[in-house]
Image (spheres, coloured by chain):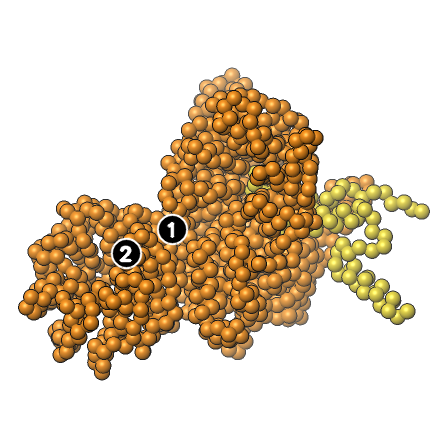
Chain colours: A orange, B yellow
């Protein structure tokens, strides 16, 4: 038995972000690391939307990421420091839409180890060298250069090791074209390690050390070091050479200091603090991330504090000697792991937790009344400046990227009564946390809905001229009339379009350069640009029943199965082909592809007949109207669509690569078939099947991100598209539609116009590639767990935050501070103090924007919330007292109650809990039915509660029980460090007996019962294991997505598929297509325990990304064709997941 | 005898190259210090562990990382007095 692993939702948190021109064009792009995958994002400077261009799984942990550019180059490269013990340099290849590995140099062991470099990366700003460093001791410098063919070269490593030294941060110093220089924050622990009195550790000072790479001598020297007054956490490199004074800004607790190799006096400025802050007064303040913006004439830095406040930092210089640091409060955004200022005037903020944002920088904060703080202002030692945070003033939010990270808990249920269940996840941290309802499907944004007179049957859009960018008319057909709407600022009816309004329409299209064509049951109407109309009338008593058309060709089927073919000649005249084709049975549907660019016609016509076949008919003049191919169908066809998919968008210097032709067949039984159509012979091969819904499938060709895709409509609407080297068939999260067409206007360049009963809707799909669409409802504190009340479908969530105040305490603290203000004021100042106190009390900054105040360790805020998940209404909240924290929740039916079916809600809380070392005052278990019934006091933390045969199990024994699940008489208990136990209750002895334990001691975070004998557990190192109740682990796999992704993973695995082919495929993929950053795939999956009986679908699915020749050689080794393999992969995916 | 000598020098090489490699006289303190430093380094390298701790403590990731670096200097307090005999 094997298990097959598929990632449904990729990690959405961002750990690193860098910006540059990676595709070599002048577009500003971002490369972000999502932990174990790399993503290329392209913010559109016009719309401000961020588009994901490429996502690559690297099967390794990305620890650091940097972008660099060789001197005089126009393209940025990416350097990745990962856990592979190798340094990797990647280049983005736009034609293939792939990252290509240019260099990979091995320097050490794999894994995230203390002395193996990879944790820190620093780049010489001129792109001449890169330093890769470990947390301790090791630092390596590689020289980057070009060879004669202008290819990037990398030298052998130069060592800059220093033992017994810890490194906090490294950065490349901008020294212009002098020898490359790197600055490191270091601390030497040797003395502290050997001094038993413990005094040495206080004497030990952090040092700022500069390493110089001597390009002439080809070695690295420790050039200069100086001790720092307080411990710093990171460095910002200051532009040098011709652009600025060079040197570094040292960001330490409460201070920011400018230093430059000791040549210049230090300039030091305290980090300003919020006025009247409720934070623990003992806390210091540090900068957590920074971004630099540099133009030819100026530069500035944006640095963010822990509270999320951004400061704009500028340096005053006097002939390249820095004289002053100036700080100015800029704006407040969520605390970030990385910020990037783009040259196009955007600020990208990769939030630590929760959604990421793209802001437009509207003002630089130069001429507002915000006070500017300067290092030159006199201040007493230990004193600082104060400012008041406010709403955004300089930044304008333009786009938001959804991030589920961290998922604290997840359950699957159908509470909304849609036939497919939804995923209920509680995500986020503190005041930015949320309950998100995920549904499989593409998010649809509704741009407009308008009512029509009567129920239309079909809709199309046409342009007036072939080269028009946007559509001109929307044509709506009714049973006995046709309505023409023109698209402009508004959409309104027109009568002078030339279309015949008194008849239903079968199809219409733009024809040639500037003509239009309308096909209606009695004929074809060809409308020339000068309003001349040519009509072709259907002969005798026959009418046109079906038609297919594109920009140059019109094919119609008359009653009785006769097919007539028209083609446009160079003068713009529609000419009928001399012969007609008689089909043996009725024509049900027809389809013809778009005219390929540079050609006269589309070569093939696909015809669906009532004898359950599809025939391919040639339209080539040599053998016009002869049948080229035939495919039998399992049911009657309903609709056909021939489209080209899989091509790559062209760029300036690279032409568009052609995709292949696909024939999509919608059947009347709700099945969609997709067949490859050979563009020369017309042969059909490699059919993929998918059931879409209960109604006949209608197909519409639309344009999505510049490529053709198919909108398939059954009882649900689906979009079949090619995105990032993979076919996607995703349902739209929208009510069912009847007919649709592509739509393009200035406001909505790529939309859909659709009809549903008597309304006309304009829709847009923006988040292509997203598997789930989400609805988000805000919560107050970090959600911990939740239960679903099955009768009402409501959720009960417990939210708990460490280091936080409850609302009550916050109010009290404010009152207290106002009181202190008044008392501190002298006689004359009472009025001022009163006003300030008043202002303090009335001030109301939402925590979700400005962050909750940090109360200090051991302070807890917690609440229990009942929420209706569909609308997101909170029905009831129970706020716990300060320092009482809820940790477990369960719904229980007690056997000894008179009403056996009465549900009781049990909440386990703890009072005065200290995290490290763990000290607990006492715990409580609250029991609610309609009101609080009972409060039980217990000694320790009740960390898990579970209903068990009319009784309740409470876990509060050491080490720490994290989860209890019960089924029948069995109890599955997960311990925080001793893995899983299976217990049974003996009624006679009133005892719980452990009858199964695990040989591997796992640090379990969550568990899930698969059946009576099997449980899946996830541990905090990111392993998933399935334990049958023998005492050995059946299978295991290393480092999945880490703790933040565990809930998803459980939903991900499907037991019991024997897949031998894939096992071999996985082996081949490992050897033929090793992960990008050089981590060995097998050892990555076996990070902590050897992987066993699991096939990694994620690597298998990369088959489609491998080039054709390799695909062929892999598949030959497996005695299969590449198509068979990829079909197999797709089948597995669609059968069990989506 | 050459073999044994060789193994000895190999061990010494390992000990100098990889900090924390044990030897016959490794004391509890030294072992603990190395273990703690290794652990902190691993936490900082694995973004998911850092996330988890940051959520638990409700601090920013940069602060958690900074705290860990600070703790790495002397994770187990001062070393015990050395017995001279």
Question: What is the x, y in percent for residue A954?
Answer: 61, 32
Which residue is located at x 36 percent, y 61 percent? A721
Q: Is residue A660 visible?
A: no
| Total labels drawn | 2
Question: What is the x, y in percent for residue A522?
Answer: 9, 63
Which residue is located at x 37 percent, y 55 percent? A730
- Quadrant of the image for the N terminus of chain A? bottom right
Residue reaching furthest to the left? A540
Residue reaching furthest to the top? A827
Nearest the camera: A628 or B60? A628
Q: Is residue A877 visible?
A: yes
A498 left or right, relative to A711: left
Query: How far apart are labels 1 and 2 at the CA level?
Result: 20 Å
Tell me: residue A844, above or below residue A546. above
Location of residue A643 (image quadrant): bottom left
Which residue is located at x 74 percent, y 53 percent? A164
Question: What is the x, y in percent for residue A807?
Answer: 50, 26
Nearest the camera: A751 or A385? A751
The residue wearing badge 2 is A696
Which residue is located at x 78 percent, y 42 percent? B78
A223 left or right, relative to B24: left
Q: Nearer the viewer, mark 1 or mark 2?
A: 2
Question: What is the x, y in percent for residue A458?
Answer: 19, 55
Nearest the camera: A615 or A39? A615
Nearest the camera: A53 or A975? A975
Q: Which structural element holds mark 1?
A: loop
The residue wearing badge 1 is A441
Q: Around disc 2, counting alpha carbons within 10 Å, would you say few (fewer than 14), some (14 to 19), or many (20 or more)?
A: many
Tell me: residue A298, above or below residue A386. below
């Amino acid at each position: 038995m094997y298990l097959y692993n598929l990632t449904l939702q990729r990690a959405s948190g961002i750990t690193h972000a860098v910006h540059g021109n990676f595709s070599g064009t002048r577009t500003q792009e971002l490369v972000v690391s999502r932990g174990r995958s790399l993503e290329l994002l392209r913010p559109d400077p016009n719309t401000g939307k961020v588009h994901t261009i490429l996502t690559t799984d690297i099967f390794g942990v990305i620890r650091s990421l940097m972008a660099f550019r060789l001197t005089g180059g126009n393209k940025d490269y990416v350097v990745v420091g990962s856990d592979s013990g190798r340094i990797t340099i990647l280049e983005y290849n736009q034609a293939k839409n792939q990252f290509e590995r240019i260099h990979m140099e091995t320097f050490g062991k794999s894994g995230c180890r203390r002395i193996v470099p990879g944790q820190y990366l620093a780049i010489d700003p001129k792109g001449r060298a890169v330093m890769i460093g470990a947390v301790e001791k090791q630092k390596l410098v590689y020289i980057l250069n070009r060879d004669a063919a202008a290819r990037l070269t990398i030298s052998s490593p130069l060592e800059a090791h220093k033992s017994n030294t810890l490194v906090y941060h490294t950065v490349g110093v901008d020294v212009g074209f002098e020898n490359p220089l790197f600055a490191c924050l270091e601390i030497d622990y040797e003395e502290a390690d050997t001094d038993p009195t413990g005094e040495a550790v206080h004497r030990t000072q952090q040092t700022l050390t500069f390493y110089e790479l001597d390009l002439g001598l080809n070695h690295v020297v420790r050039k200069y070091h100086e001790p720092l007054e307080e411990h710093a956490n990171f460095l910002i490199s200051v532009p040098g050479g011709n652009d600025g004074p060079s040197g570094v800004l040292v960001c330490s607790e409460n201070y920011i200091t400018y230093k430059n190799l000791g040549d210049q006096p230090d300039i030091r400025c305290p980090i300003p603090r919020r006025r009247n802050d409720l934070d623990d007064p003992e806390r210091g303040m540090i900068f957590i991330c920074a971004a630099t913006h540099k133009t030819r004439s100026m530069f500035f830095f944006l640095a963010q504090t822990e509270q999320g406040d951004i400061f704009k930092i500028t340096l005053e210089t006097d002939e390249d000697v820095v004289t002053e640091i100036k700080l100015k409060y800029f704006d407040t955004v969520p605390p970030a792991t990385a910020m990037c200022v783009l040259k196009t005037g955007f600020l990208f903020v990769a939030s630590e937790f929760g959604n990421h944002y793209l802001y437009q920088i509207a003002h630089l904060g130069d001429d507002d009344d915000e006070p500017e703080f300067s290092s030159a202002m006199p201040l007493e030692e230990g004193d600082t400046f104060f400012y008041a945070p406010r709403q955004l003033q300089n930044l304008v939010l333009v786009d938001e990227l959804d991030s589920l990270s961290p998922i604290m808990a997840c359950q699957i249920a159908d509470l909304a009564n849609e036939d497919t269940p939804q995923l209920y996840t509680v995500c986020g941290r503190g005041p930015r946390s949320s309950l998100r309802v995920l549904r499989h499907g593409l998010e649809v944004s509704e741009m407009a809905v308008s009512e029509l007179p009567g129920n239309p049957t079909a809709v199309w859009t046409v342009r007036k001229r072939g080269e028009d960018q946007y559509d001109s008319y929307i044509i709506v057909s009714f049973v006995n009339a046709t309505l023409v709407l023109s698209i402009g600022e508004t959409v309104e009816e027109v009568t002078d379009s030339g279309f015949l309004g008194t008849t239903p329409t079968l199809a219409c299209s733009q024809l040639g350069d500037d003509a239009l064509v309308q096909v209606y049951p009695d004929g074809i109407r060809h409308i020339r640009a000068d309003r001349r109309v040519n009509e072709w009338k259907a002969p005798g008593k026959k009418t046109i029943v079906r038609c297919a058309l594109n920009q140059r060709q019109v094919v119609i089927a008359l009653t009785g199965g006769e097919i007539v073919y028209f083609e446009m000649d160079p003068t713009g005249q529609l000419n009928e082909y001399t012969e007609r084709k008689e089909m043996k049975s009725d024509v049900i549907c027809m389809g013809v592809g778009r005219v390929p660019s540079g050609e006269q016609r589309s070569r093939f016509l696909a015809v669906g007949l009532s004898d359950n076949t599809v025939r391919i008919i040639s339209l080539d003049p040599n053998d016009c109207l002869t049948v080229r191919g035939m495919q039998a169908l399992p049911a009657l066809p309903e609709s056909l669509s021939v489209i080209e998919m899989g091509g790559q968008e062209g760029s300036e210097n690279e032409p568009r690569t052609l995709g292949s032709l696909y024939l999509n067949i919608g059947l009347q039984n709700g099945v969609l078939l997709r067949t490859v159509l050979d563009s020369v012979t017309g042969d059909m091969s490699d059919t993929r099947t998918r059931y879409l819904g209960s109604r006949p499938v209608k197909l519409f060709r639309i344009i999505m991100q510049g490529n053709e895709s198919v909108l398939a409509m059954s009882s649900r609407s689906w979009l079949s598209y090619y995105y990032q080297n993979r076919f996607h068939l995703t349902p739209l999260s929208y009510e069912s539609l009847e007919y649709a067409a592509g739509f393009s206007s200035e406001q909505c360049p790529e939309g859909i116009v659709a009809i549903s009963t008597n309304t006309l809707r304009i829709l847009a799909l923006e988040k292509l590639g997203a598997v789930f669409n989400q609805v988000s409802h805000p919560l107050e504190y970090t959600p911990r767990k939740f239960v679903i009340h099955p009768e009402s479908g409501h959720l009960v969530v417990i939210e708990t935050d460490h280091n936080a105040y409850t609302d009550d305490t916050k109010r009290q603290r404010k009152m207290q501070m106002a009181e202190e203000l008044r008392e501190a004021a002298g006689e004359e100042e009472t009025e001022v103090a009163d006003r300030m106190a008043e202002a303090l009390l009335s001030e109301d900054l939402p925590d979700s924007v400005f962050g909750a105040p940090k109360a200090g360790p051991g302070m807890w805020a917690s609440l229990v919330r009942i929420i209706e998940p569909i609308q997101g209404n909170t029905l009831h909240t129970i706020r716990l007292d300060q320092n009482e924290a809820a940790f477990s929740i369960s719904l229980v039916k007690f056997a000894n109650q008179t009403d056996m079916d009465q549900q009781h809600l049990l909440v386990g809380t703890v009072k005065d809990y200290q995290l490290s070392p763990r000290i607990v005052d006492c715990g409580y278990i609250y029991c609610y039915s309609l009101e609080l019934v009972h409060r039980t006091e217990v000694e320790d933390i009740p960390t898990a509660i579970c209903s068990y045969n009319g009784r309740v199990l409470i876990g509060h024994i050491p080490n720490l029980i994290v989860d209890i699940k019960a089924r029948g008489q069995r109890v599955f208990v997960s311990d925080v460090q001793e893995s899983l136990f299976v217990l049974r209750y003996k009624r006679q002895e009133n005892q719980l007996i452990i009858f199964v334990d695990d040989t591997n001691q796992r640090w379990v975070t969550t568990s899930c019962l698969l059946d009576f004998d099997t449980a899946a557990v996830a541990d905090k190192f990111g392993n998933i294991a399935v334990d049958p109740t023998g005492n050995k682990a059946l299978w295991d796999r290393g480092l999945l997505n880490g703790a933040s992704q565990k809930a998803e993973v459980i939903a991900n695995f499907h037991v019991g598929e024997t897949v031998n082919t894939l096992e071999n495929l996985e082996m081949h993929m490992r050897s033929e297509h090793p992960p990008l950053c050089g981590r060995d795939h097998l050892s990555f999956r076996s990070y902590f325990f050897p992987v066993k009986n699991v096939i990694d679908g994620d690597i298998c699915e990369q088959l489609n990304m491998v080039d054709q020749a390799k695909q062929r050689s892999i598949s030959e080794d497996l005695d299969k064709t590449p198509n068979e393999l990829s079909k197999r992969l797709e089948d597995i995916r669609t059968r069990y997941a989506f | 005898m050459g073999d044994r000598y060789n193994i000895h020098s190999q061990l010494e090489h390992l000990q100098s190259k990889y900090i924390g490699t044990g030897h016959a006289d490794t004391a509890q303190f030294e072992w603990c210090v190395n273990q703690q430093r290794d652990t902190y380094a691993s936490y900082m390298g694995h973004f998911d562990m850092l996330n988890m701790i940051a959520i638990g403590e409700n601090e920013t990731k940069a602060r958690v990382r900074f705290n860990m670096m600070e703790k790495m200097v002397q994770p187990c307090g001062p070393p015990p007095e050395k017995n001279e005999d």
